[in-house]
Image (cartoon, helix red, strand yellow):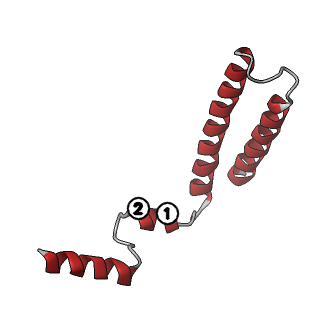
Amino acid sequence: MAVRLKQAAYSRQQTGDRTKGGVAQERDRKPRGAADKTNFYNIAQGSLEELRYYAILSRDLGHLPKGAGLTCSLDEVGCMLHGLVAAIRS
């Protein structure tokens, strides 16, 4: 049993822990095309909307001042993301 663990540890060191379907392999993967980039930007848009929700909630609860300018910044980032997706699709 101990020999197998040592062999597995050595194997991971030699391959850089890039096993098929492993977390390390996914982390090192680069976007390969328009579909991957569009998917990435769509996820970013979802995260932006989640951030927008929490900003509104924080403002309504009194944790953010009404003139914080965060909404304008979020709108600007949203326009940039929309432009990136539109550029990729065309």
Tag 2 residue: 23
Q: How many marks?
A: 2
Q: Position of residue 74 (x, y in %)?
A: 77, 35
- Amino acid found under the numbered disc labelled 1: Arg
* Left-right relation of 2 to 65: left
14 w.r.t. 44: above or below: below
Q: Is residue 65 above or below residue 75?
A: above
Question: Residue 44's image quarter?
Answer: top right
Q: Quadrant of the N terminus?
A: bottom left
Identify which residue is drawn at 82% across, 37% down: 73
Q: Residue 67 lies in what quarter of the image?
A: top right
Answer whether labels 1 and 2 touch (C-beta < 8 Å): yes
The residue shown at (15%, 76%) is 2
Residue under label 1, please give it: 27
Type of amino acid under label 2: Val
Task: Decide: is 62 above or below 84.
Answer: above
Circle 2 crowding by C-alpha within 10 Å: few under 14, some 14–19, many from 20: few
Query: Secondary structure under badge 1?
Result: helix
For residue 38, side relative to residue 60 (left or right): left
| Residue 86 point in image, percent of width and height | 73, 46
Disc sitting over residue 83 in the figure: none
Question: What is the x, y in percent for residue 45?
Answer: 65, 39
